Amino acid sequence: MSSKDLILGTLRKNVRETYDMPDLGFKKLTFDDPVAEFIKQVTTTAGAKLVEIKPGDDINAKIREAYPDAKVIASNLPGIDAQKNPDEVEVAQDLDGTDLGVIEGGVACAENACVWVPMNMKQKAICFISEFLIIFVSKKNIVSNMHDAYKALEQMGETSKYGFGTFISGPSKTADIEQSLVYGAQAACGVTIFLTD
């Protein structure tokens, strides 16, 4: 028995009162144009940047245009000019010093600009240790709300190569200390969504 099973089993044994799951049949927030709402939320609420990628665009030129000062780029996406590959480094610490991580997102949610990032790289640290992130998002994967996002993930099945994934919405920020807003406290200081057709 794993420690997780042991902990959950102990908790279940000591629960005195149980409650039914809430009814989720209520009307969910939907948008006539989820893509337009996603763009709005990315650039306002989430505090990220957005670059629309057209067919035939030179992706590496777009990356350099968005982050001209990035010296160390990490990515395992085909065709990306990167100095580090999260599939080829031995340990996550080898990604320390990464200026820019370039990753692929899955389902994206218009209501809060969250993007599901499946762990399709050996070292997931690229998502959190990079100073800046570029996340590729396809317009066809944008849904209105988180309920639809989880449904889409269920329908797609687990697409993560390493059995992990996370929702990312804009740069990492916190105002816990002295109510001063700090960017990059737990992860990337800045995020740019590369929106594709």
Image (cartoon, helix red, strand yellow):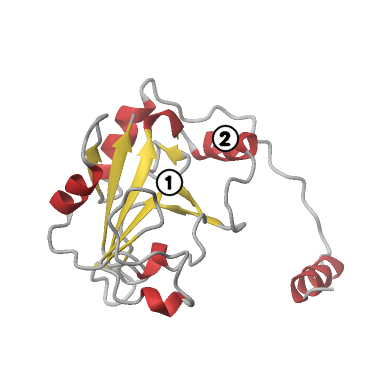
Please state the horizontal and vertical placement of residue 48, each as a whole percent of the image. Answer: 26, 50
Q: Counting other residues with Cα less than 10 Å from the Cα at mark 1, is it few (<14), some (14-19), or many (20 or more)?
A: many
Three-letter amino acid code of the residue under disc 1? Gly
**Position of 23 relative to 171 (above/below):** above
Closer to the observer: label 2 or label 1?
Answer: 1
What residue is pinned by disc 1? 105
Q: Secondary structure at mark 1?
A: loop
User: Given contact means CB atoms under 8 Å apart, are the residues at marks 2 and 1 in contact?
Assistant: no
Please state the horizontal and vertical placement of residue 71, each as a whole percent of the image. Answer: 19, 67
**Position of 155 relative to 176 (above/below):** above
Separation (CA) of disc 2 from disc 1: 13 Å
Q: Counting other residues with Cα less than 10 Å from the Cα at mark 2, is it few (<14), some (14-19), or many (20 or more)?
A: some
Residue visible at 40% across and 38% down in the picture: 111
* Residue lying at the far top of the rendered structure: 32
What residue is pinned by disc 2? 152
Residue visible at 59% across and 58% down in the picture: 162
Indicate left or right for 68 with 113 as reference. Answer: left
Q: Secondary structure at mark 2?
A: helix
